[in-house]
């Protein structure tokens, strides 16, 4: 089922994520600060960094914010290019991991931001700018195959990242971390969002499902894991001489299951594809990965079905985790848009759980929580 990668084609017009440099307004109109002391620390840092890097301080404006406590600012430089500033309070975000993983990605040949200046004490970082258009914005949701070239570029970047893997460099994605992430589902999605506290047999059902999920995922070979490898964190090329996708939001990288990032890519937190397209891209990843020795585990290198089942088990762990995270973002952090995607995760969870005998009780538990009425009985012919 091999195929050569088509030539990348991008839409002639896409909506940019960030404000174009030519439309920038002075910083006093675009960037606000809740903490006056942090604002003063930033202005002191920028006054030092601006002449060193040729920055035009008056061009400062918001670039984006993400689900964490970080935000990103953009400003112009004297040579016509732009730079990104990461604003990451050090008491809430560990910038050291960002710097470390950025270096690993550059060593692997990936296109990641380069750290130009870093005020570690205050959490301000100057980065190269990978552009303003994400892969997500270029995707044609109505025509899956039109996006194949982009997804194959993402697959190539992912394999380069995995080939650079070494143990003992990044934190290990071990049973403790897998279980800690899974606990977000009962704590935040069930407990805080649905108002359900499991007891007795229902708690046993959840516990047994989590044991199966962790066991399956720990059995996979370990590689470097981006941990949020999806179109929202991949940037379209900005120069004709470099067609690599840019990679962002990698500071939570770990050393863990080889199945994680491809599951993240194809079972997106914000985008749903029919399974034929998911299979198409995943099998292309499988073909490339096995040829370079990434899938030398049991019969994975010969049996795509065995590998795909492992991807499903990994995706299930991620979807349970993200459902809990999105509930927390909404209920604790006031970011209501995230929980609106909950039905996508419930669909992923139910679909996977329904395929495996040991997870059927868990699927019935989810159906009860979500008040999903499943039609049972025998039927003949088409319905």
Image (tube, helix red, strand yellow):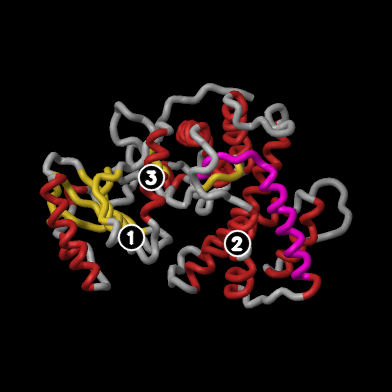
Rounded to the nearest angstrom, the CA distance separating label 3 from label 2 is 30 Å
Residue at 57% across, 35% down: 281
Q: Magenta span covers which residues?
A: 202-226
Dot 2: what SS?
helix
**Residue 300 falls inside the magenta stretch:** no
* In this rendering, the label closer to the viewer, 3 or 2: 2
Horizontal and vertical percent position of residue 195: 63, 77
Residue 273, visible in the rendered structure: no
Residue at 13% across, 57% down: 47
Dot 1: what SS?
loop
Contact between labelled residues 2 and 3, with CB atoms less than 8 Å apart: no
In this rendered view, identify the residue nearer to me: 39 or 141.
39
Residue 122 appears left or right of 325: left
Q: Which residue is mark 2?
A: 180
Q: Which mark is residue 88?
A: 1
Q: Which residue is mark 3?
A: 134
Residue 246, visible in the rendered structure: yes
Residue at 13% across, 45% down: 54
Q: How many numbered discs? A: 3
């Amino acid at each position: 089922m091999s195929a050569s990668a088509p030539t990348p084609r991008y839409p002639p017009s896409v909506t940019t994520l960030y404000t174009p440099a030519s439309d920038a307004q002075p910083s006093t109109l675009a960037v606000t600060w809740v903490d006056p002391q942090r604002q003063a620390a930033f202005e002191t840092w920028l006054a030092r960094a601006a002449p060193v890097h040729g920055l035009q301080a008056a061009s400062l404006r918001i670039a984006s914010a993400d689900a964490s406590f970080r935000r990103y600012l953009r400003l112009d430089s004297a040579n016509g290019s732009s730079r990104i500033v990461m604003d990451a309070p050090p008491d809430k975000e560990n910038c050291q991991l960002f710097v470390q993983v950025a270096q690993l990605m550059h060593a692997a040949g990936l296109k990641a931001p380069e750290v130009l200046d870093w005020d570690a004490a205050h959490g301000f970082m100057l980065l190269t700018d990978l552009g303003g258009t994400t892969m997500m914005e270029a995707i044609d949701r109505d025509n899956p195959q039109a996006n194949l070239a982009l997804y194959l570029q993402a697959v190539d970047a992912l394999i380069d990242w995995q080939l650079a893997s070494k143990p003992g460099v990044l934190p290990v994605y071990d049973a403790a971390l897998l279980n800690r992430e899974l606990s977000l589902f009962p704590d935040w999605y069930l407990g805080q969002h649905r108002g359900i506290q499991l007891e007795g047999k229902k708690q046993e059902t959840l516990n047994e499902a989590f044991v199966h999920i962790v066991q399956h995922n720990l059995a996979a070979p370990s590689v470097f894991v981006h941990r949020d490898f999806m179109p929202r964190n991949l940037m379209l090329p900005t120069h004709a001489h470099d067609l690599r996708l840019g990679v962002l939001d990698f500071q939570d990288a770990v050393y863990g299951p080889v199945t994680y990032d491809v599951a993240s890519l194809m079972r997106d937190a914000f985008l749903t594809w029919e399974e034929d397209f998911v299979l198409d891209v995943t099998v292309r990843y499988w073909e490339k990965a096995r040829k370079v020795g990434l899938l030398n585990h049991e019969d994975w290198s010969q049996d795509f079905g065995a590998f795909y089942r492992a991807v499903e088990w990994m995706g299930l762990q991620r979807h349970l985790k993200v459902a809990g995270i999105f509930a927390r973002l909404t209920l604790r952090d006031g970011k209501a848009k995230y929980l609106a995607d909950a039905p996508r995760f419930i669909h992923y969870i139910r679909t996977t759980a329904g395929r495996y005998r040991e997870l059927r009780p868990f699927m019935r538990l989810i159906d009860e929580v979500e008040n999903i009425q499943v039609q049972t009985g025998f039927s003949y012919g088409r319905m």
